Amino acid sequence: MLPFSIQNKLFWDIDQNNLDAHQHRAFIVARVLERGTLQDWITINKWYGKDVIKQVVTRLRVMDKR
C-alpha cells in the first residue's frame, strides 16, 4: 500500500494493497508523470525527491513523449 496519497484513478488497473512505494517506484513515477496531475507530481516529489525521480526516469525504457 502506498504511504502517500495519490489519486486512485492512476492505479485503477492494479490492487493498490500490493503496491509497495519502494519496490514499485519506477512504476509509480512513470504512471504519475504520464497520467497524473500537478498535485500527484508534488506528492511524489516530496516522497521520493528529485534525485530519485531523475534516476528512475533515466532508466525507463518507454515514456510517453508528453
Image: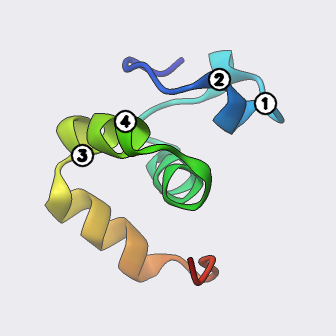
Q: Is residue 33 left or right of residue 18?
A: left
Q: Amino acid at mark 2?
A: Asn
Q: Amino acid at mark 1?
A: Trp
- The residue where tag 1 is placed is 12
Q: Which of pointers 4 and 3 indicates the residue nearer the eye?
A: 4
- Residues at circles 1 and 2 in contact by the CB criterion of under 8 Å: yes
- The residue where tag 2 is placed is 8
Q: Is 18 in front, or is 53?
A: 53
Residue 16, relative to residue 11: is it above or below?
above
Residue at screen point 38% across, 17% down:
3
User: For the residue labelled by badge 3, is the local secondary structure a helix, a strand or a loop?
Assistant: helix
Q: Is residue 22 visible?
A: no
Mark-to-mark CA distance, 4 and 3? 10 Å
Q: Amino acid at mark 4?
A: Gln
Upstream in sequence: badge 4 or badge 2: 2
Residue 3, relative to residue 44: is it above or below?
above
Q: Is residue 54 left or right of residue 26?
A: left
Upstream in sequence: badge 1 or badge 4: 1
Residue reaching furthest front? 38
Residue at screen point 58% across, 61% down:
34
